[in-house]
Amino acid sequence: MNVLNKSKAVKCLVALSLASLALTGCSKNKSKAVTGGTSKSIAVFVPGIIADSPIYAKMVEGVQKAVEENNNDADRMHPASVKIFEAGTDQTQWSSQLTALCAEAKYDCIISSNPSLPELTEPLTKQFPSQKFILLDAMKEGNENITTVRYKQDEAAFISGYIAGMMSKSKKIGLITAQEYPVMNEIILPNFEKGSKAAGLTQSVDFRIVGNWYDAKKGAELADAMSASGVDVILPICGGASQGVVASAKEHKTMLCWFDSNSYSSAPGLVISCVSSLQEKLAKEMTLKFLKDEIKWGTYTELGMKDGYVKLVDDDPLYIETVPEDIRKKVNEEIKKICD
Ligand code: RBF
C-alpha cells in the first residue's frame, strides 16, 4: 500500500467510526452498529408539561431507561437514540406539532401518553404510513401503526372513592379535574362515586373543572369553594393546578386523595390515598419491546391492580400513620375483591 492509499484508508476508517458514533448516539457498542445492527430512533411526545405531571415524567424516565439499558447491553445489535419533545398545554397545537415530528421522518417510533392521542395520531398514520406510535394511557384497536395500553382507571377511582368515603366526616367528597374528557366523565368520576357509596356515602361527588392543566390559582379557588360547602376530601386530577388544591387543603385541613404517583409527603397527614399507575415500568417495557421488534401493532391492552400496574401505595409510613388500621384493613379487602 503506497502512502497515498494508506492515508485514504485511514480517512475512510475515521469516516466510518464517525458514522457509527452518529448511529449509536452515545452507545458503548459502536462496533456493533457498523457490523450489523440498525439504529432505532425514538421520540417521546409529552402532551403537557413534564414537571407538572408525574404520569408524563414517569413515561420519559421509563423510555430513557429502556434506551440506556438497550445501548449498554453488549449483545444488542440495535443501538437506539431518544429525543424528548415537551408539547406544552396548548392542545390546539398538538396536532401540528405531531405532524411536524412525523414529517421530519427521523423517528421510527413516537411514544406518548393520554386518552386523546389515538384521535390525533390516527390521521397521521395515513399521511406517514411508516410512522409507528406507542400510546400509553390510551385505547385504540385495529390500526397497524399504533399500539395502545390503558390503565384500569375504574379500579384506581373506586379504591380512591372508597378510602375517601371511609375517611370523610362530613360525608361530602369532591373531585377537581382540569377538563372534561371521556375517561374522566365515564370512568374516573362514576367509579370515584361508586367507591364512596360502597363506603356508605349517599351524596353525589362535588365535581368541578379548572379549564386547563396549569392554573394553580384556579385550582385553589375551586378547592376553597368546595371546603366552604362542607367537602372534606378532594381528589385533584388537574396537573399543575393540583398545587393550588394542595395549598388550599393545607389551609382548610381538607383531606386529599391522589392519582398517578406517591404524593403523601406533599401534605403529610392530609393525603389519605395515593393510587399510582406504574407508568415508568410500562414505558420501559414497551420501549424495550419496540427495540426488540416484539410489539404487537394494532392492539389494545388494559392493565390494572391484578396485573400490578395500578397500585395503592400502602407501605408508605405516612399512609399507615394517617389512615386508621381498621380502615386500611377494609381497603385491603376491597382491593382483594378487585384482584380475585
Ligand atoms: N394528566 C396530567 O397529569 N397532566 C396533563 O397535562 C394531562 N393532560 C391531559 C390532556 C388530555 C387531553 C387528556 C384527555 C388527559 C390529560 N391528562 C393529563 C390526564 C391523564 O391522561 C390521566 O387521565 C390522569 O393523569 C389520571 O391518571
Image (cartoon, rainbow, N blue to C red):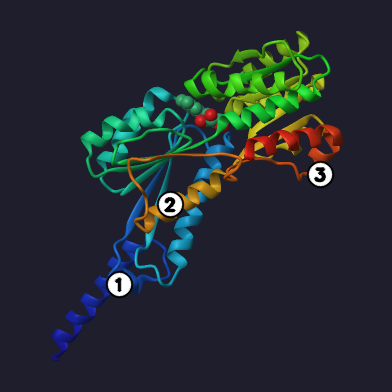
Give residue 312's quadrant in the image: top right
**Quadrant for the C terminus in the image:** top right
Name the residue nearer the viewer: 87 or 178.
178
Q: CA distance from mark 1 to mark 3?
A: 52 Å
Give residue 271's quadrant in the image: top right
Q: Give the number of the disc on residue 287.
A: 2
Report which residue position mark 3 lands on. Answer: 317
Q: CA distance from mark 2 to mark 1?
A: 27 Å
Q: Which residue is pictured at 33% across the width and 44% down the height?
A: 297
**Quadrant for the N terminus in the image:** bottom left
User: What is the secondary structure assignment of the residue under circle 3?
Assistant: helix
For the question of whether residue 266 can be seen, the reply is: no
Report which residue position mark 1 lands on. Answer: 17
Q: Amino acid at mark 1?
A: Ser
| Mark 1 vs 3, N-terminal side | 1
* Residue 167 vertical position relative to residue 73 in the rendered view, above or below: above
Name the residue nearer the viewer: 92 or 128.
128
User: What is the secondary structure assignment of the residue under circle 1?
Assistant: helix
Q: Which residue is pictured at 42% across the width and 24% down the height?
A: 91
Q: Amino acid at mark 2?
A: Thr
Name the residue nearer the viewer: 186 or 256.
186
Q: CA distance from mark 2 to mark 3?
A: 33 Å
Image x and y of residue 213, in percent = 54, 24
